[in-house]
Image (cartoon, rainbow, N blue to C red):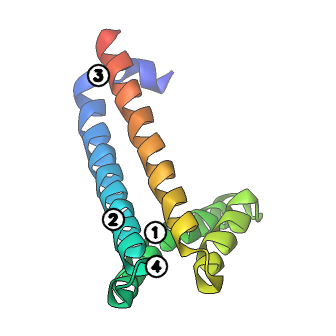
Amino acid sequence: MKLLKSSPASVQPDMVAIGQATDRKLAVAMVTLGLRAVGSFGFPLLTLLSWPGNIYLASIFIRLVWQEWQTERKVGVNAISAANLSFMPLVGYAIPVTLYYVLVFFSRKLLLKTRNKSRQEL
């Protein structure tokens, strides 16, 4: 009910900030995927340069686990995702994990865009 009572002006700045954060995460994921892909074709230095992006993107999922633990006092599916996404690059699955990040943040971007469009049409 609170969402219905709020004015569009008060909702819009929050949505803009969330959209910008999602765009930034998507850009990091795409650059990391590009560095990984080019690095696997013969430029191993680029693979090393992609590790900060992987660590940053994994920290997002680790933060979700921490928030879930603080609010609900339980470990859920986010913990399994964070563990897989943190350790799979170490055993050689870095490109699929980075592609997963791109797909996750691209889908979030599309979801936000759809929500904004539907709010504007209402």
Secondary structure at numbered mark 2: helix
Q: Hey, what amino acid is under mark 2? A: Val
Q: CA distance from mark 3 to mark 4?
A: 38 Å
2 or 1: tag closer to the N-terminus: 2
- Disc 3 designates what residue? 7
Secondary structure at numbered mark 4: helix
Q: Are marks 2 and 1 in contact (CB under 8 Å)?
A: yes
Secondary structure at numbered mark 3: loop
3 or 1: tag closer to the N-terminus: 3
Q: CA distance from mark 4 to mark 1?
A: 6 Å
- Disc 4 designates what residue? 55
Tell me where residue 45 appears, x and y as whole percent: 33, 90
Tell me where residue 71 appears, x and y as whole percent: 65, 59
Name the residue: 41% across, 35% down.
110
Q: Are marks 4 and 1 in contact (CB under 8 Å)?
A: yes
Q: Residue furthest top?
A: 122
Q: CA distance from mark 2 to mark 3?
A: 33 Å
